[in-house]
Image (cartoon, helix red, strand yellow):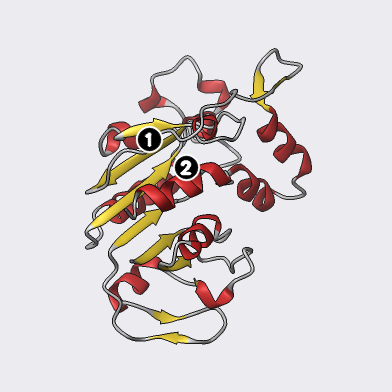
Amino acid sequence: MKILVACEESQAITKELRSLGHEAYSCDLLPCSGGHPEWHFNYDVFKVIEEKGGILQNGNIVNDGIDWELMIAHPPCTFLAVSGARWYYHPEDKGLPTSERRPHPRFPNRAKDREEAVDFFIKLCEAPINKIAVENPVGIISTRYRKPNQTVHPWMFGDEASKATCLWLKNLPMLEPTNIVGKGERVVLSSGKSLPKWYSDALTKAKSSAERRTLRSKTFKGMAQAMAKQWTK
């Protein structure tokens, strides 16, 4: 199959698809970190879809008019996930109706960024490709677009970790668990809240906000393998 993996600089799923013999390419505004620039479009995904190919990161050109049969997309979740909701409004306005709250002083453009993120997400879901899967954590897309077809975790596919991953599917089956294991360790914070250990480790390891986003968006190997195998049967 000819497959486009959108918003994936890690190439985690692209590698699994390639290992099965598919003509898969990753695409992201960031250069790939997966080690295969010959499989990576380093620019806007909608241009790659429209032009049915383009210039790869290594300079080679894919110009045979690719009719993409499947797209798996991982749009950025910074402005969509419920975990970031506290950054939309001024912390002093908690008791006010949302319509009367001021923007957060650190992120005054958060509402505009959210609207752009929602539009980008919906555009991916409605791209002119026959089979589409778009993933994101729990967030506002359920109310702004539609509810996901299913929600899965890495522990359903052999990795002992919890990470709620919502899937919006078009002409694709829901993923079937392949190896249910433990849900993974959790770390209790001083506030009393707990986080999955893999997530806590990512926050500790990251040296910048950009690196933190990359580590948080990690695709676990078991889930990547399940997507590659089950959606290309």
Numbered disc total: 2
Snapshot quadrant of residue 181: top right
Looking at the image, residue 13 sits to the left or right of residue 48; the answer is right
Looking at the image, residue 95 sits to the left or right of residue 221; the answer is left
Q: On screen, 146 above or below 66?
A: above
> Which residue: 35% across, 86% down?
63
> Which residue: 28% across, 51% down?
125
> Tag 1: residue type?
Glu
Percent of width and height locating residue 179: 51, 32
Snapshot quadrant of residue 6: bottom left
Asked if residue 131 can be seen in this view, the reply is yes
Give the mark nearest the N terminus, 2 or 1.
Answer: 2
Q: Residues within 10 Å of mark 1 (few under 14, many from 20)?
A: few
Q: On screen, 172 above or below 198?
A: below
> Tag 2: residue type?
Phe
Q: On screen, 67 above or below 87?
A: below
In what quadrant of the picture does the N terminus appear? bottom left
Disc 1 is placed on an element classified as: loop
Percent of width and height locating residue 202: 71, 40
> Which residue: 59% across, 46% down?
218
Percent of width and height locating residue 210: 65, 52
